[in-house]
Image (spheres, helix red, strand yellow):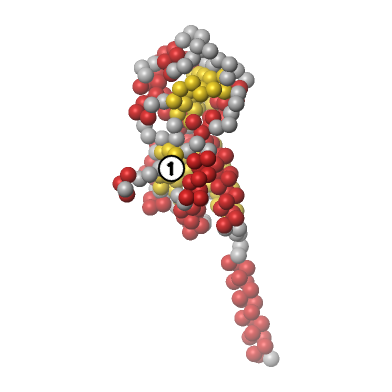
Amino acid sequence: MFSFIGWISILSQVLVSCTQQVKPVVLTISAGASLKSSMEEIKELYTQQKPKVNIMYKFSSSGSHQKAIEEGAKVDIYMTAGSQFMDDLQSKGFVIDDTRKNFLKNRIILIAPKNATGISKFKDLTDNKIKKVAISNPATGSSGKYAEEILQFFGILEQVKPKFVFTKAGTDIVSLLKKENANAGIIYATDAIKVNEIKIVAIAPENSHSPITYTVAVLKASKNIPEAKEFVQFLQSDRAGSVFVKYGFAIFIDQATQ
């Protein structure tokens, strides 16, 4: 009888252990809005490979995510365009340093409504016919910061500033132009993929702004650090890379390792 009870006890412990091992893990990922379409497809690929990992995204401006993380938002992974917001979080001790990786690049473009005339370059934004220029808010959105750098490069920032219409993300800029509530917009090239109601007017020279490098890192507050590290590693795989290229991104290549 004692032996039988002992075996039952051991079996119960094994079953509990197995149950704990297969418990699904939820990864919460805060990402810039320009990553939405590509990351949704990445999610499908990854969950096929890791069915016990559930991915929950929060898409918004990079600055909004930074503020939320600093205020205690439960986030496992942070992804952003540009280094400013990630640098701030890292300097304040929110980031696991050796998990920070650069993985994508993007371009900035000037767009206009499909039937617009009289605009073919950035300097045309000073024309009196251009009343409203939509950009993301530079205080919270990386593309808005790059937009200001580009206009400064061309020497027209102060002339164009009074025309600014601020939005939260590039998709909002596209919506404004579709409805002709803005005469032009400055966005990431990836935000214009498969949008027929607008036209690309110009591509900003790469030397007109600081490098547009997307960076990702696991946060120290994560309760799922091993799983988060695995996901970050997957983002740098060839399989994930093919998805990013499909949506207009370029893969970041670390020249230091070449």
Q: Give the residue type that dot 1 points to.
A: Ile
Residue at horizontal 36 percent and vertical 31 percent from the top: 210
- Taking depth in this image into account, of 98 and 245 the one nearest to the observer is 245
Given residues 31 and 201, the one toward you in this image is 201
Q: Position of residue 136 (x, y in %)?
A: 50, 27
- For label 1, the SS is strand
Q: Position of residue 97 (x, y in %)?
A: 38, 50
| Residue 208 occupies quadrant | top left
In this view, the residue in front, 252 or 246, is 246
**Mark 1 neighbour density, 10 Å: few (under 14) some (14–19) many (20 or more):** some
Residue 105 at x, y percent in the picture: 43, 38
Q: Residue at x 53, y 38 (%)?
A: 247
**Mark 1 = which residue?**
251
Residue depicted at 35% across the width and 45% down the height? 254
| Residue 165 shows up from this direction | no
In this rendering, the answer to whether 110 lies above or below 92 is above
Q: Quadrant of the N terminus?
A: bottom right
27 relative to 105 in the view: left or right = right
